Image: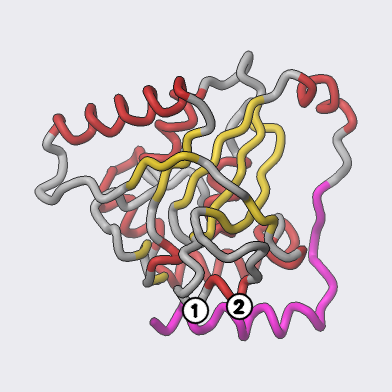
């Protein structure tokens, strides 16, 4: 797809430019991190998924990366071949005393096209398939319950395509992918709009859809 093929070009251009903004140090979060929990979600472009969860109160950190495949330590170029089995995913570190895993699942569902298992929005292929990766039995139970609730609601005319799989090895993506929306807000907004992400989320979920605008 045109927008997907634009991503490497955007990255090449941006490597020559200074970041427009950056994440500030937040030492106040250190204490919360000690009691933090981790969740992992895949919903297409990890630039966008990272932004969706960074806006959630109680989320301490988000990390873009690759998981769910069979190739050790894959790179972006490896994953986009669709031959490693990996997906672009985001590891969410959160304070469970502020935001629950169930609440994060609600954010996830409203920021994914749940009936498209062959990619997400303009990003096509298995590297962009939607997956909830659970880290323990309780996360699995909650993820499966949320899946069942959505399926039984009959909101959509097609089956729910999101997979629920155990979390495995997670390879952090290259530095240029981390906090992309903060470093390059213009290019991020251009890509997100051009990919049709928020337009599709609004079509699917109405005003509930798209927390990453």
Q: How many labels were placed on the picture? A: 2
Q: Is residue 99 magenta?
A: no
Secondary structure beneath dot 1 equals: loop
Q: Mark 1 = which residue?
A: 81
Q: Position of residue 22 (x, y in %)?
A: 81, 55
> What residue lies at 62% left-to-right and 71% top-to-bottom?
76
Q: Is residue 146 left or right of residue 167?
A: left
Label 1 packing within 10 angstroms: few (<14), some (14-19), many (20+): few
- State if disc 2 and disc 1 touch (CB < 8 Å): yes
Image position of 82 with respect to 48: above or below: below
Give left or right: position of 120 versus 127: left
Instruction: Please state the horizontal and vertical placement of residue 156, each as a whole percent of the image.
Output: 15, 45
Instruction: Determine the residue located farthest toward the top in the rendered image.
Output: 97
Helix, strand or loop at label 2? It is helix
Q: CA distance from mark 1 to mark 2?
A: 7 Å
What is the number of the mark on residue 77? 2
What residue is drawn where x is 32% and y is 47%?
162
- Which quadrant of the view contains residue 171? bottom right
Provide residue 27's location: percent of width, then percent of height. 89, 31
Magenta stretch containing residue 7, yes or no?
yes
Say above or below: 139 vs 119.
above
Residue found at x 63% / y 80%: 10
Range of the magenta residues?
1-23
């Amino acid at each position: 797809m045109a927008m997907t093929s634009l991503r490497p070009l955007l990255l090449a251009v941006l490597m020559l430019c200074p970041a427009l903004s950056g994440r500030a140090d937040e030492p106040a979060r250190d204490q919360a991190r000690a009691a933090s929990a981790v969740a992992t979600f895949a919903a297409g472009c990890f630039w966008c998924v990272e932004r969706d969860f960074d806006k959630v109160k109680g989320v301490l950190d988000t990390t873009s990366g690759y998981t769910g495949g069979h190739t050790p330590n894959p790179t972006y170029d490896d994953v986009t071949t669709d031959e490693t089995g990996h997906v672009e995913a985001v590891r969410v570190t959160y304070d469970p005393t502020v935001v629950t895993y169930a609440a994060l699942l609600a954010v996830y569902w409203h920021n994914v096209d749940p009936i498209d298992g062959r990619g997400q929005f303009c990003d096509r292929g298995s590297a962009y398939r939607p997956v909830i990766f659970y880290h323990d039995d309780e996360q699995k139970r909650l993820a499966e319950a949320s899946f069942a609730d959505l399926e039984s609601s009959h909101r959509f005319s097609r089956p729910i395509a999101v997979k629920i799989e155990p979390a495995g090895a997670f390879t952090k993506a290259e530095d240029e992918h981390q906090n992309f929306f903060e470093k390059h807000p213009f290019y991020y907004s251009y890509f997100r709009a051009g990919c049709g992400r928020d337009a599709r989320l609004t079509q699917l979920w109405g005003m509930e859809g798209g927390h990453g605008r």
